Structures are given as C-alpha cells and as structure tokens.
Amino acid sequence: MKAFSYGRAKSVADAAIAASKPGVKIIAGGTNLLDLMKLQVETPSTLVDINRLPLDTIEETSEGGLRIGALVRNSDLAADPRVRRHYGVLSRALLAGASAQLRNKATTAGNLLQRTRCYYFYDVTKPCNKRVPGSGCSALAGFNRIHAVLGGSEACIATHPSDMAVAMRALDAKVEAIDHEGNTRTIPIADFHTLPSRTPEIETTLNSGEIVTAVTLPPPPPGAQVYRKVRDRASYAFALVSVAAIVDSVHGRIRSARLAFGGLAPKPWRVTTAEQKLTNATAGTTTFDAAADAVLESARGYGSNDFKIPLTRRTLHGVLGEITRT
Amino acid sequence: MEMDGPVGANALDAEKIVGKPLDRIDGRLKVTGGAHYAYEMQQNALYGFVVEASIARGRMASIETMKAERSPGVKLVLTYRNAPKQGTGNHREAHPVLTGPVVSRYGEPVAFVVAETFEQARAAAYLVDVKYDRERGQYALPHHLALARVPHQPDGAPADSEVGNFSDAYASAPVQIDVSYSTPLQSHAMMEPHATLAMWDGDKLILHTANQMLNQGQRVVASTLNIPIGNVRLVSPFIGGGFGGKLWVNADAILAAIASRYLKRPVKVALTRQQIFHVTTHRSDTIQRIRVGTDRDGRIAAIGHDVFSGNLPSEQVYEAAALQTRSLYAGPNRLTRHRLVPLDIPVASSMRAPGEAVGLLALECAMDELAEKLKLDPIELRIRNEPAEDPERHIPYSSRHLVACMQEGARRFGWDKRNSTPGQVRNGRWLVGMGMSAGTRGNPLRFSRATVRLDPDGIATVRMAMTDIGTGTYTILAQIAAEMLGLPIERVRVDLGDTIFPEAAGSGGSFGAASSGSALFEACHALREKLAGLAGMDPNTARFGDGHIATGERSVSLTELVGSGVEADGEIKPGRNNQDFSQQSYGAHFAEVGVDQDTGEVRLRRMLGVFAAGRVLNAKTARSQAIGGMVFGVGAALHEDLVLDPRFGYFVNHDLAEYHVPVHADIPASLEAVFLPELDERSNPLKSKGIGELGICGAGAAIANAVYNACGARIRNYPITLDKVLASLPDQA
Ligand SMILES: Cc1cc2nc3c(=O)[nH]c(=O)nc-3n(C[C@H](O)[C@H](O)[C@H](O)COP(=O)(O)OP(=O)(O)OC[C@H]3O[C@@H](n4cnc5c(N)ncnc54)[C@H](O)[C@@H]3O)c2cc1C
Ligand code: SF4
C-alpha cells in the first residue's frame, strides 16, 4: 500500500470537488478499494471518505419507484421491506453476494463500481491491460475460468463481478451522479458500465470527478422475479453465471420477460432479442432454446471458461421453467 | 518405555476423566483473546515484509534497493548481497534464504524489508526493483511425467512395494478395472498466517513462531544459521492451525532471525495471505493409476497403484498416495509405485493426511467402480476383501475394525435405501445420490519426553515442548495427568510450546496425542511410584483419587506428601510393535449429495463418519477433529484447486477469494462423526490411535461416489466442479 492522505467530505459538493483532482479516490465501504490498495493495484494519493454524507436513505419516488442512496449498505437494501416485497430479484441478488460481514459494509455505489476479480488484475507482477494499459492481457491465453464469454475484447475479457448490478439491470435502474460543478445527471444502468474494447481501463461512463449519489428504481414491473446464482460453493463465491429474470406469464403463456446475466460479460448483460423471443410465446423447450440462442449468439469461450456457454443455456432453461410454472 | 508387546491393564482403563467430552481447558483464553499467537507478542519489535520473486526460474540481473532504503521508517533491506552465509539442505534439514541471485521457484524471497511499522515496511517492499533474466522451467506435472524418478525419502516408507506377481495375476483376472485419477495442487489454508517474532539475547535466539514441531524446528534453525542447537529457543504455545504447513521452518522465521541479529532489535513478520501460497509449502498434485483384478465374486487377485507427484529437484518428499493400498485390502499379488517429477515450483510437502487424503480419493472411487462392474454392493465388495493379516508385511493388525465401521455406518445412515442405479432419485431440482468409502490412516508413534511435577499447593504441572495447533492437546494431556494422579482436571496445569521443556514429537502425521500423551503417561507413572514410595505404599496397589493416595484403609493427602514438590520424567519410544504389527486407524464414510439438474452444482446434504481408532481421549475434541477432517474431505472432493499457470510457473488463484475451501453454507447440519469402542494393546500405553487426520481419509471419495450415484458423472479429475458434471446431466424438459 502506498502512503496516502485521508480526508472526510463535508458535503456531496465537497466530495465531488475533491474527487475531480488527480490521484483522488472516493472511499465508501472500502471492501474493494482497500483490498486493491494493499496489493498496490490501486494507488491513490488521497482518499475522500464519504461515509458520513446523508446518502444512506431509501425513499419512494413520485413515480412509485424507489430512490436508493449511494451509501445504503447492501444488507440494509436487501432487508428493506419495500425492496423485498416489490423488487425481490434485487433483494435476492444482494443476499447471494459476498458474506454477511461484507454486505454490512458494502454500499450501493461501491458495489456498482467494484472492480473485476480477474486473478491477473490482482497481481501487479502480471501483464494486465486494465491495470497497465498496453501491457497485455494474461487471461486471454491463461486461466480464464471466471472470465467473459460475451462482450469481451482482445484487450480484456474480465467480468463485472456484481450480483446487485445484474438485478438492477433487469429492473432498468438509473444511476444519479453529480460533478464538481454541481451538475447532476441520470445515467440508465445500461449505459453506466462500458465494454472494454481497446480501453479496458475505462469501466463506466462516469466522468472523472463525478460521483454517484443514488440509484433509482422505476415502479416494479409486472411478473414474477427470480435471481439464480450459479457458483462453485454454496456461499461466498462470485457467480460463474447468474440470471435475473422478471417474467409475466399466465398458464405458460408469457406476456413479457426481462433477463439480465452476471458472470458472463464485462457488464451486467441484457439481450433484447432474447426477451423478444419470449414475449407472447408459450413456455417450453423450444421457446427457451430460442431465447438461449439469442443470448449466446455471439458467445465465445477462451478455454477454461468454455463451459459457461452450455451452463448459461441450462441455467436459463431452469430459471424460465421455474418462473413460468408458478 | 519402548512399545514392545501388549500394554495390559493400566490406570487409564477406569476412564473417569480420560475420554469424557470435556471442554478445552484453553477455550476461555482463546475466545477472550488471552491466548497470544506469535505475531501478537509485543516486544517493541520492528516489522518485516517479504519481497517475493515474481519469476519461477532464472536469475536476478539487478536488484535495486536504494529507494526502499530511503523510504520512511525503513531500517534494513536484506538481499542476497548482505545476507549471511547459511547452512543448506532440503526443506526438512535447513531453510536458507536470500542465498544468491539465482531464483529456483516462484515466490522465493528476494528481499526482506524491515521498518518501524508494518505499513512502512510494506510500502517500501514495493519499491525494491528487481530485474530478472527469466529461464525456461518445468512447471506442470502432467507435462513432465517422462522426467519421473524413484524418490528416496530416508525417513519415509520405500517408494515401491511388490508382492507376488502383479502383472500376470492382473492379466489373467476375469474382472478388471484400470482407471486413472488426478488430484489437484492444494494449499493448507490454515487460519493463522505463518508468523514469527525473532529476538536475540547475546548469541541466543528466541523465536516466537507458528510451528507444529518445535524440536525439529530448533534443529532446522540451528543448522540454517550455523549456531548451536542450544542457542535456539522456539516458543509456540498457540497456533492457529497448521495442517502440515507449519511442520517445518519457513522463511518468516529465518528472515526475522537474520534481520533481528543485524539490527539488534526484535523483528516480527507475518506472511500475507497471498504470500503464503508461494512462500511456504503446498501439496503436490497427483496422477494415479489403479488396476484391480478380481475373480467373478470380487475377490482381489491383483491390485496395483501407481502415483506421480512433483517437487523441486532438490527435494525427495513425494505424495505417498499408494501407502494405504499396501494394507487396506487382501489380495496375493500387489504392486505400488511412487514416482517423483522434478518441477521448478514451490516446495511440496505434507498437508492434511499426506498420502491417504488423495490416495483414497482414487482407490476408494476405483473400488466403487469395481463394485458396480461386479454388481456388488460397495460394502460387500470391501468385506469380501477384508484381510486376515497385513497382505504385504504378513504380520497381524494391532487392531482393525473396518468392517464394523462400515456396518454400523450403513445402519445409521440408511444405506439400504440407496438405489444402486445412478440418476434415479430426485428431490425437486436436485438429483440425489449416496456414496460410501472406507478410510484408513497409519498410526505412528514418535519419541517424546514429558515432565510432571506435583507442588504443595496440590497443582500438577505438565511440561513438554509439545504443541497444540487447535486440536485439543492441552485438554487431553490434562485429562491424562488428572486421571493418573487422581486429581480434578482443574488442578492440572499444562505448559506446552517451548523448547526449554522436554523434547516432544509436536503435532503432525496423527502422532501428536499418542506420542505426547504416552510420554506424559510414563511421567505420571513414575510420579505415582515416587508418591507411593513417600507414602510407604506399594505403587502397584495404591489407589489415586480425590487428591489422595490410598491403600486398604489408609489414605494420605498428596499435598502432605510432596514437601516442596515432587517431579518425575517420562519417555516413549516406538519399539518392536512397529515391526511386529500393522498399525492403522480405520473409518467408513457415508455421504448424500444433491446435484442440481440444471447447473451441475454439487451440494452435500448429509454425511456420517464412523471410526475405530483405539481409545478416544476426549469425546468432544475427537468428534471436532473428525468433523473437521470430513470438511477437508468435502473441500478435496468439491472445491480445493490451486491452479498453476504454466506460462509463469505460479499459482494463479493465490488468495482465499478464489482458492475455495468449504464455507459454512457448504456443510449441512447433519454431518456427524461416531467412534466405535476400541482399545489397541499394541499402539501405546494409552491404547489410543492417531485420529488427527483420520476424518479426512476417504471422506472425499464417499462424496465423489455419491455424485456418481446421483447423476452418473464419474469424475476422475478432482475437484468435482460443475463444469465437469454438466455433460452427464439429463436433458432438460
Ligand atoms: C471476498 C469477497 C467476496 C465478494 N463476493 C461478492 C459477490 O459474491 N457478489 C458481489 O456482488 N460482490 C461481492 N463482493 C464485492 C462487494 O460487493 C464489494 O466489495 C462492495 O460492494 C464494494 O462496496 P464498497 O462500498 O465497500 O466499495 P469501496 O471499496 O468503498 O469502493 C469501490 C469503488 O467504488 C468507488 N466509489 C464508492 N462510492 C462511490 C461513489 N458514491 N461515487 C463514486 N465512486 C464511488 C470507490 O472509489 C472505489 O473505486 C465480494 C467482496 C469480497 C472482498
Ligand atoms: S482479462 Fe482484463 S483484467 Fe484480466 S488480465 Fe486481461 S486485461 Fe487484465
């Protein structure tokens, strides 16, 4: 860990101004940032602590949705009765993540902005384009069991590890941000995370110095909600594949469907064509296969992650079977 | 005492205190933070941080330390340029560090930075700039089998064994199986990291260090630093798990000792979690081939087990995965062979039941495959091959109740409800299956000494350089002394973990309790004789109880007898019983798993281990140890997998987020361990057998066999992760 200076932001504006300076990093729960600093993957010269800012409430919006403050802890969000009742997919996704201790610390914004778990990214002695642009990608021809089969590039095939963000993607959440001049804007979650292309070091569309203040959820969509996380052990493991599904169906007749995937891509993944295949279709193998085909159309494995392609198909099949039976 | 002949009736047979499920006597200290581990010792110490080699083979072209030296708080940067010359040898003889510019394995320390604070040392460590000339190396075991050689491990069993004529008997057997299994690289993953606080008093060195075998450690430190053994003291009263990873001295101890001598101040260091994977030892991966030929009734005519494992070219330690195959089942024609492949990766050494833990993952699944081929129940197959004597050494077993373990386990587990056709049982989304396995582990005894002293305050104090790595050694030793001397357990004080005390075997290889407990038994026996002498009683008929010694009507309080205190020593040595009797502990494991029909995720639903391992010294700590071992079995079967990247010669997933061990959610509430009553007259005066590692042995195989029974996936390369199971799953409706 490199020596750094530490300050506590007095206001959101204060934090945004501080964050616009080079070398400055916001610290929220610190569960990701501090680990990376200990390994010198992140080497900020200044930490701005936002934990005392009043961004820790969940409020109902006038549209009938929820506005979740950037500092709401993952545990609190998962346990909120409104979330549990109307956004079950989000509650379950949160509870499927990390461990109870981590969730008590982890914040909404920190979770969205957590960085990949790629093994090579974590080891500063190994080439990694995301950490050191241009140094090469060790995962492409290396051990890539946890890596992306969709949306990656020749520069980087890291996945975004969040469970929470997958549910938010299915819910069409919006991210609110503020910059150092006090300008606010709202970014649909679909546009929040970026694909690596040739610049894997850029992971979101946040401008430098822009900080996240809240995430809003639109009114709950119709239908049943399921979050299924497939992993190597029963808890405390990142998703190999996860599916957030919101499907409105009656007697096997699907009216609408939303599907978001984790573990597959550099960002929470959604495929409109797959959802279209399900809309107004009859639940069953043919329909599910068509949806899976659409999801996996451009999928490619890199060796140790090849299994994610059949696994995604099977998981999706299982989830759709379960959700359309209820 | 040497173990020659049977033990006979003795003072422990009453089992008034020994065997009882007593709480750990050090439990309160541990949960209140009163038990101090090596890194917690406060001695105004400086802090060290290790810089690891980031190549696996080659040499340093340059090493630039100026920036680190000028970094705030830094007192010393040790490299090969300023490190002293040290003794050499394999990792069980010496542990020299910073010996030169040559790098022979990934993670080898190349510098050691010492500063006023931990943070300063860590920050400066990243400023040490090393340029390497990389050389090509051999890293992956499967790629280099052609280089295999016969290992010569001087203190270990011979690498090969042969009885009868295996190849002819196998070739002519009407039923044959020939299967290959592989097990992955594994890391100990104990809770407490390797840590040392080193300080010098003149030319005497004191190391507070996390170490399982202090007297061995003392020798290794002395021969590394070229100082007399008497000038080295190791102190290690509490150890947060070792699992074999702390059997031998690691770099933390030597680096801290050298730096402390140089700086004339105490120096402490703890390896980071990530560093442990490369800087210390691991378990080699194995490739195993098992061939069994039987008659049509399943009676073994020929059994063969070939094992490949890897280690540094300078090491002889191999993974003895075929050891149990030499004695577990009958059969006249036998062949076992271990081959060692020289690899340029970190040192492979003992980890959690070395040998059996991974050997049984292969052998006991092969037996399951054989049972299926013969259309026999797996237990019946094993019973048909129950030997009357050790089939290779042609000597009797000291005690062996494997069949009883299997039968009792079958009864308790409901084995008769198992459907022997795979893939038939469903529970919602889950395909459910049952599997079983036999388990066995050698029962070693090692030289140990102990002192016990009774003071006028009525307190008996036990002293020995034994360790308690979390297993309950303090408690069982207190129970033995209390039972022998007729004292309540609160009146016994146990001092362990210091080489100023009498030499003891330490904790490892399932020899700890038997060796240290027997030495203590002997010491207590000697003390009883002294006390009887003082009381003018016949030691053979005197009764000890309630703090008194009595004979006939006469009873004397011990506190009145001892004057200013009476002390006695005891000693145990393995004797002829080792050659005359085949000594193993036994068990049987039963597992029920669910396999997710969509994803292939395997989850354990319930598990039972039934063991026969001589006298149980404490029913509670024994059960905990057995359950812990079974959890290791779960990890070995389903999770643990240290992945080598052959491009870099390093372990990719070197942290606990990605090196998976089972977590609570992986272990069902219904995981139970049961011990059958057994006394072993030939093992040691306690009539106990080693149970430190028995719980591991066979546990993983029972799970693997249950996976097969659940879904028909016979996965022969561990761990059984879902990607390997996927192809065997039924089509989705
Ligand atoms: C062992 C382990 C297992 C885990 N398992 C899972 C899992 O299974 N699933 C899962 O989803 N997650 C998992 N996590 C990750 C965990 O969810 C994240 O670490 C956590 O959500 C990060 O939140 P935080 O508040 O601690 O972020 P921090 O570490 O404080 O910050 C993370 C990043 O976000 C930035 N940041 C924080 N707040 C703001 C803001 N308001 N505006 C702008 N930037 C900001 C920081 O500068 C930093 O770059 C795991 C973590 C660990 C250590
Ligand atoms: S996948 Fe991305 S994060 Fe991982 S090594 Fe390649 S560039 Fe780095």
Image (cartoon, coloured by chain):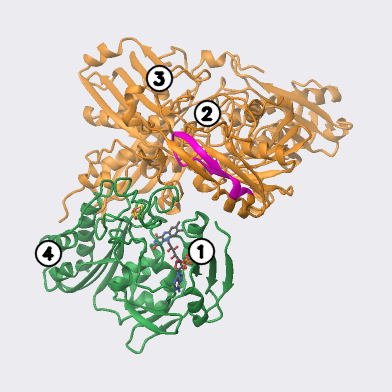
SS at circle 1: loop
Single out the mark in the foreground, 1 or 4: 1
Q: Is residue B566 left or right of residue B469?
A: right
Instruction: Give the color of chain A as drawn.
Output: green
Residue A287's disc is 4
Task: Give the answer, above or below, for where A197 lies relative to B521.
Answer: below
Q: Is residue A153 left or right of residue B577?
A: left
Q: Residue B253, position in %: x, y?
A: 63, 37
Residue B326's disc is 3
Q: Residue A26, position in %: x, y?
A: 49, 70
The chain letter for the residue carrying disc 3 is B
Local crowd size for mark 3, using a 10 Å CA cut-off: few (<14), some (14–19), many (≥20) = many
SS at circle 2: loop
Q: Earlier in the sequence, mark 2 or mark 3?
A: 3
The chain letter for the residue carrying disc 4 is A
Image quadrant in which you'd find residue A203? bottom left
Q: Earlier in the sequence, mark 1 or mark 4?
A: 1
The chain letter for the residue carrying disc 1 is A
Q: Quadrant of the N terminus of chain A?
A: bottom right
Single out the mark in the foreground, 3 or 4: 4
Badge 1 vs badge 4, beta-carbon distance below 8 Å: no
Q: CA distance from mark 3 to mark 4?
A: 56 Å
Residue under pointer 2? B678
Instruction: Give the color of chain B as drawn.
Output: orange
Residue span colored magenta: B50-69
- Ligand 2's quadrant is bottom left
Which amino acid lies under the numbered mark 1 shown in the image of this protein? Pro
Single out the mark in the foreground, 2 or 4: 4
Single out the mark in the foreground, 2 or 3: 3
Q: Residue furthest top?
A: B164
